[in-house]
């Protein structure tokens, strides 16, 4: 279980106010979430070129595309990493 200070820190980062009841609930649920994230981090066969998405409608540049060459698509991209296009982070604070 996470400490109250850790949960309050997460709440602060998320810019939310939580009650004492919610604090106790989040101590347990955040711990479970972090445990699941740790399982992913521990994967031995991690490949950064893989794309994980909860959506089924994803565009995979490696699949056969109708008359479009992968190299031609990435030719004018300003920043790329492998087969992925790097984009700026757009976060409002």
Image (spheres, rainbow, N blue to C red):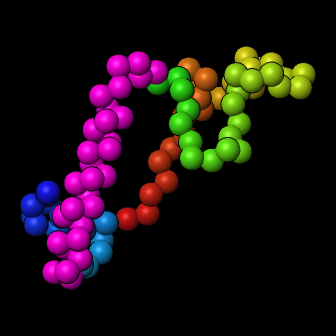
With 8 as the anchor, is 16 left or right in this view? Answer: right
With respect to residue 6, does 54 lie above or below? above
- The picture places residue 82, in percent across and down from the top left corner, at 56, 20
- The picture places residue 44, in percent across and down from the top left corner, at 35, 19
Q: Who is closer to the viewer here, 65 or 73?
A: 65
Number of disc labels: 0
With respect to residue 69, does 15 lie above or below? below
The residue at the point 49 percent across, 54 percent down is 90
With 25 as the anchor, is 6 left or right in this view? Answer: left
- The picture places residue 89, in percent across and down from the top left corner, at 47, 48
Residue 39 in the magenta stretch? The answer is yes
The residue at the point 31 percent across, 66 percent down is 14
With 47 as the anchor, is 62 left or right in this view? Answer: right
The residue at the point 14 percent across, 57 percent down is 1
Residue 76 in sight here: no
Residue 22 in sight here: yes
With respect to residue 79, does 37 lie above or below? below
Q: Quadrant of the C terminus?
A: bottom left
- The picture places residue 5, in percent across and down from the top left corner, at 9, 64
Q: Which quadrant of the view contains residue 12?
A: bottom left
Q: Which quadrant of the view contains residue 2?
A: bottom left
With 55 as the anchor, is 14 left or right in this view? Answer: left
Q: Which quadrant of the view contains residue 16?
A: bottom left
- Residue range (magenta): 19-47
Residue 20 in the magenta stretch? The answer is yes
The residue at the point 32 percent across, 42 percent down is 37
From the image, give the main secondary structure of the stretch colored magenta. helix
């Amino acid at each position: 279980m996470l400490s109250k200070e850790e949960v309050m820190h997460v709440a602060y980062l998320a810019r939310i106010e939580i009650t004492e009841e919610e604090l106790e609930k989040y101590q347990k649920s955040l711990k479970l979430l972090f445990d699941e994230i740790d399982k992913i981090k521990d994967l031995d066969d991690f490949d950064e070129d893989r794309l994980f998405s909860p959506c089924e409608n994803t565009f995979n540049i490696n699949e056969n595309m109708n008359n479009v060459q992968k190299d031609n698509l990435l030719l004018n991209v300003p920043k790329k990493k492998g087969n992925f296009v790097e984009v700026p982070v757009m976060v409002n604070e």
